[in-house]
């Protein structure tokens, strides 16, 4: 593997989950692999879990880690071509990227959707420039339309907790005060398409995800119906794809409450975090014994370490 | 030791000072102890000495170090329970803390008094949530009402410089333009209560520390009287405890000047830093040969390393 | 070597370039040298290349690295003496520097010209306080009037690409929207004075560099004339020295374009980065095969590692 921008690049999911299981059991077994290798983590956006779990994963592999917050302590970067750079941006990505590439063996990039142009976001303009110009293996730490390290952690978590071969998994939209990217739900749908689970997406009208991510997947606008018999409930807010980046609804009837969970088959609750309590999910659901949000977050180390290991093996 | 939030947790002070002496002489002797162990340093507030000395201490012990500035590059954290999170805070401490715990073996936390509620501050709401929810050993890098790593460094410094078994130590309030927490003076008083030194606190009326920290300690409102015959002068500003968080005085007669030091037994001068020159202390006193502020700061590495070593030994 | 603030401290340039060549070929050969040694990188200003390349260099040498952004997460520092510190600055450099010194074996400092006083800038007030008070070897990561790590990287790059013993090297001023320090051009002129290259500086009237840096160097106000037959073109903006810190011209006739490069001997193009495209240099020149800006930036690791190695050897 020399790039990781979609969970589909894991290839054979069964093998990837086995690799993750090995990493879980043997976190320090591959320290020789990362020796004298440096991973650079480039953040255009805030991060807690990704920042820490990816550092931890790299340190477990014996790597050197450098963290760059682009908007703190570095230069503001121009991303458009052909511009006369007489404004507040001191440097162009076209220089910054190959320079970063020359200082690192592997580069992780976090670059969220900007909601300025659906086309730009869905073309992953920033991430793809890193791939094109850095000269080094690049992995996504959440880009505009996918968050594959999160999805891999989700898959690992479901694998650890599922009690049947083919669980029913429901991803449900839930309300949130601000416009959020579609990276996590897109990516989770991709991950589910790699399984034979019974997967359903529930969201209000106007919130259907991009067709390229929902092809062949059951989508309903009736949350209660979707939740019936669910083994896993994956809650997430996202802004509209159709009316791109807009918040069409903050309908608190979509909040995942105890009453909603009562419709399920005593489902486990999943969320990628950070989560707005009592918007996305009620206190009692997220604090219940069926909530897996903490082991799910803990699996972010396993996910990142398994991916970094694959990238290191193919350097 | 599996938590370090008060200097009293050092237990036998004599043994702790011996452990510190060993660390001073053998800074790299315990690198095997920290191997494959990660300490996460979480800062809710600014830091220079604590940030660097704690990193250095952990590196000396062979540990991996991750630094998280909560207000830079991470999500703003909600700390109150039961809130509908529809504002600017994206994540709740109740999720963030166990997640951080899952990425680290030991967690250091800096969380100053907020002066919004004396009760909240004196209940150490943030620090105690880390202890309760992280699942990992937690140590204070200055919390709302104590700064035990500083006090331990102070004790180490006094031990190195005292010329008699029972020196007279005076902690004196001094003026400052802004409201400062009581963590350092509270903690220093705690440290002194572990010794049999002749300890006196001098502060203006209205500035008496919380009774729980001054029980059995002589407190005077007459600085000159206190300074008489002192072997060590520990200067510090703090805001009022009684009129909680208020600045009642900026009386420059309390500034530690050459004239004030002339009242002492050629005392050593101590301050935890950062210090406002010519408010707390005059240039000539802080630059004099009796000023110990730099060795005192240098001892922050020894203090942190000794404590981290104890935490590692009991993992 | 126990300080590195000017490229002249490299002494014998030929030997220094050989040392750099060795480091390029054997990046991990000296990891024992840096073991248990900590470098502290102190940034008063933004940084991308210096931040990453110096970290990388130190890690290649097996060192521990601590990064401190003075204006983020630390205390604001007072730099003037004798001040009553009742404003927004919590700490004085006179305390902060020896404290930092006590936590590190080697200190790197970035402190740009402030353009408040030419005298202060040209006296390197901040950098020299670090040298005077830290008690540790100090190296410049760009100070007010010199950027020696950059110049050393420039010299290494020219050495790698020159096709004749005595190439013609032209440093030309180019337009920029804001006032920039003279550190890079001063330092590059110093570097050229260590060679026997045919070196010319071209800049508009009013932009002559300080006499101490241009002594014995040909300076012209005619860019076209200077570019004729050039083997290397080093573009850079700087604010006026004479009318200190002022932007006297944004004349786009000084932009390095394809037409300008046609005057040269198919010259290589150099710039320290970050660069304002279509102000300093046109897209087509910086993207051309003769542009060396990326290998030049990559050599920042070699430059820093060679210097750190010299500092470590003399600890």
Image (spheres, coloured by chain):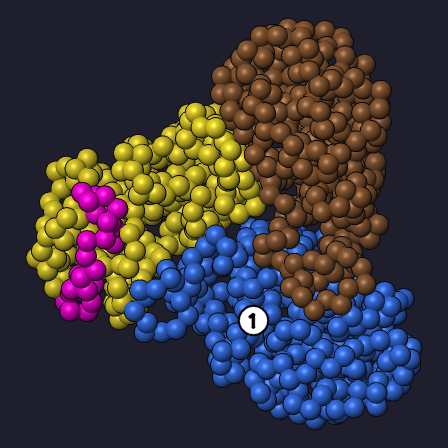
Chain colours: A brown, B yellow, C blue
The verdict on residue B255 being magenta is yes
Q: Chain of mark 1?
A: C
Q: Residue C94, located in which quarter of the rendered image?
A: bottom left
Q: Nearer the viewer, residue B43 or A277?
A: A277
Task: Determine whether A254 is above or below A99 in the image.
Answer: above
Q: Nearer the viewer, residue C24 or B215?
A: B215
Q: Is residue B48 left or right of residue A294?
A: left
Circle 1 Cα neighbour tier, 10 Å, few/some/many (<14 / 14–19 / ≥20):
many
Residue at mark 1: C112
Q: Residue A137, located in which quarter of the rendered image?
A: top right
Q: Is residue C260 left or right of residue C92?
A: right
Name the dominant secondary structure of the magenta segment.
Answer: loop
Task: Determine whether C121 is above or below B227 in the image.
Answer: below
Q: Is residue A192 left or right of residue B300?
A: right
Q: Would residue A140 be seen by someone viewing this image from the given angle?
A: yes
Q: Which element type, helix, strand or loop, lies under badge 1?
A: loop
Locate the C terminus of chain A and report the quarter of the image it occupies. Answer: top right
Locate the N terminus of chain A and report the quarter of the image it occupies. Answer: top right
- For the point 72% across and 66% down, which residue is it? A85
Q: Which residues fall within the magenta stretch? A: B237-262
Q: Nearer the viewer, residue C311 or A287?
A: A287
| Count of numbered circles on the image | 1
Residue A130 drawn at (x, y percent): 78, 49
- For the point 49% across and 21% down, which residue is it? A283
Task: Determine whether A53 is above or below B251 in the image.
Answer: above
Residue C53 drawn at (x, y percent): 68, 58
- For the point 27% across and 67% down, which residue is it? B278
Q: Would residue B292 be seen by someone viewing this image from the given angle?
A: no
Residue B174 drawn at (x, y percent): 22, 58
Residue B274 drawn at (x, y percent): 35, 57
């Amino acid at each position: 593997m020399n790039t990781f921008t979609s969970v589909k690049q894991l290839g054979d999911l069964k093998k990837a989950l086995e690799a993750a299981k090995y990493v879980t059991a043997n976190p320090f077994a591959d320290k020789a692999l990362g020796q004298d290798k440096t991973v650079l983590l480039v953040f255009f956006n805030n991060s807690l879990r990704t920042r820490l779990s990816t550092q931890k994963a790299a340190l477990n592999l014996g790597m050197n880690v450098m963290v760059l917050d682009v908007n703190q302590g570095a230069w503001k970067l121009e991303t458009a071509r052909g511009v006369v750079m007489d404004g507040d941006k001191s440097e162009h990505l076209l220089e910054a990227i190959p320079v970063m590439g020359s200082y690192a063996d592997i580069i992780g990039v976090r670059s969220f959707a900007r909601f300025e142009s659906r086309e730009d976001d869905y073309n992953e303009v920033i991430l793809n420039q890193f791939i094109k110009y850095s000269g080094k293996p690049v992995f996504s730490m959440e880009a505009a339309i996918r968050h594959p390290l999160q999805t891999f952690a989700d898959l690992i978590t479901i694998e650890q907790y599922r009690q049947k071969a083919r669980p029913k998994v429901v991803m449900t939209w839930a309300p949130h005060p601000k416009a959020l990217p579609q990276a996590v739900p897109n990516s989770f749908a991709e991950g589910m398409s790699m399984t034979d689970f019974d997967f359903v997406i529930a969201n209000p009208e106007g919130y259907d995800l991009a067709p390229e991510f929902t092809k062949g997947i059951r989508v309903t606008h009736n949350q209660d119906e979707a939740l019936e018999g669910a083994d896993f409930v994956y809650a997430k807010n996202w802004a509209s794809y159709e009316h791109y980046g807009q918040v069409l609804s903050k309908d608190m009837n979509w909040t995942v409450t105890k009453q909603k969970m009562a419709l399920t088959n005593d489902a486990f609750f999943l969320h990628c975090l950070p989560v707005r309590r009592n918007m996305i999910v009620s206190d009692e659901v997220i604090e219940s014994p069926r909530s897996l949000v903490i082991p799910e977050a803990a699996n972010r180390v396993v996910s990142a370490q398994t991916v970094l290991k694959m990238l290191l093996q193919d350097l």
